[in-house]
Image (cartoon, helix red, strand yellow):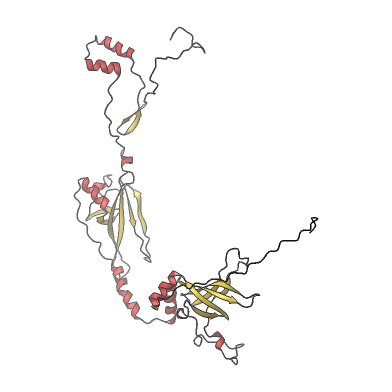
Amino acid sequence: MNQSLPCLPGYNFRDFTKTHFGLPRTLIYSKGVPVPQPIFSATTKRALELLDAQNKVLDTEKAAELTYGPKRSPKREIQLPRHLAMDKKVLRFSGYFREEIFDWSRENYRIRPVKVLYYLQDDTMEVIEPKTPNSGLLQGTLFKRHAFPHPNGKGRKYLWKDLNLRKDIMVYGINIRLTDCDQWTREYLIDAGLELNEPEPIPPDPHQQQKLTMGPRKEMRPRSLEDEKLHKFLTNDRKVLRFYGIWQDILSEPPEMRRVILQYYLADDTLEVLEDHARNCGRIPFKVLVRKQKIAVDANELPDSFPKSYLEVKEDDTTWFKPQDLRTGKDVVILGKKIFLYDCDEFTRHYYKAHFGIEDMESIGVAEKPKPAVSRVSPFIHPDGIK
């Protein structure tokens, strides 16, 4: 290319001898951190100038390096910085601390188990107490994640080398005893050269031991009627026996068969009947056929002379529906509606098998009669086009 030509459009020509179009690298890695490097390119002109300056006393290997560039160095493993290499790596210890009780004679101290977490990323720690139901204590995170100060008072912080099993650590005046750790923590400490002690069990809490001994004593006391109802509600809450049945509606014109769902609530011995509407059946979307209530088995067996207008039937004199009165393949009468039960759900089958030993709660196939086909007559068309 003629260097004397002005740098104007149309006066510049592309160098057809150029074969390398790569961009030079601007970053190098130093201790795992990318840092910028000066941009320069090794050219033949610079190599010849260097050779002339050294009076051509260089060896063959050095001359080849200056002429053709340095040899490609072997690939080195990238060393990540500590905050990346130790990210999400946590040492997990189990332990406890003893809390003294001064204002109650029945309990002198409590044993409160905790979890001690050590984050290797930034050498911070955290203490968490698992929540115990109905304990009445403020549990959860006892000490938030931060660098715990060492009790020597010289500005030193706790490190992972200070943690070991069967060892006490002092955290803001609370003496925490480390008893065990998980498998990953054990392998990490052993690989780091720490001689790990054997784990030890957490001593039992006197209050929890007392609660375990008081449990059988409460069962020996007779329950009152209110306790029986409460126990039944807490035991059978959200437990429902579900049956599928067919009810013949004889009052409709013409009489038709309707599919219903009978649900028996074990918590309070109540029943409800819901209509099982088919999709796009055209009925009003109101499924409650019989609202949730206690249904008497012999409600229609009262004599005609019974004064219903001013006397009520006592609950003890009435036989209410029980789970024993409901079975597949059987007709039940609920407020004058005769319902045939043909199927039930899986929970109902397991309940009858576990409590009554009934295993023949099989599904009964029920099929509706096909409706007669409606014949369609094509309209009369007049030859002149007038209907």
**One can see residue 301 in this view:** yes
Between 1 and 143, the residue placed more toward the observer is 1
Between 228 and 386, the residue placed more toward the observer is 386
**One can see residue 242 in this view:** no
Asked if residue 350 is positioned above or below residue 23 in the image, the reply reads below
Total numbered labels? 0
Q: Is residue 363 left or right of residue 377?
A: left
Q: Which residue sits at x=22%, y=11%?
A: 57
> Residue 211 placed where, x, y %?
32, 71
Asked if residue 162 is positioned above or below residue 357 in the image, the reply reads above
User: Image quarter for residue 50?
Assistant: top left
Residue, far bottom: 305
Q: Is residue 201 left or right of residue 361?
A: left
Between 355 and 231, the residue placed more toward the observer is 355
For the N terminus, the image quarter is top left
> Residue 114 placed where, x, y %?
31, 58
Residue, far top: 4
Between 84 and 158, the residue placed more toward the observer is 84
For the C terminus, the image quarter is bottom right
Q: Which residue sits at x=44%, y=81%?
A: 225
Q: Is residue 264 left or right of residue 106?
A: right
User: Image quarter for residue 32?
Assistant: top left
> Residue 329 placed where, x, y %?
48, 77
User: Image quarter for residue 286?
Assistant: bottom right
Asked if residue 65 is positioned above or below residue 295 in the image, the reply reads above
> Residue 357 placed where, x, y %?
38, 78
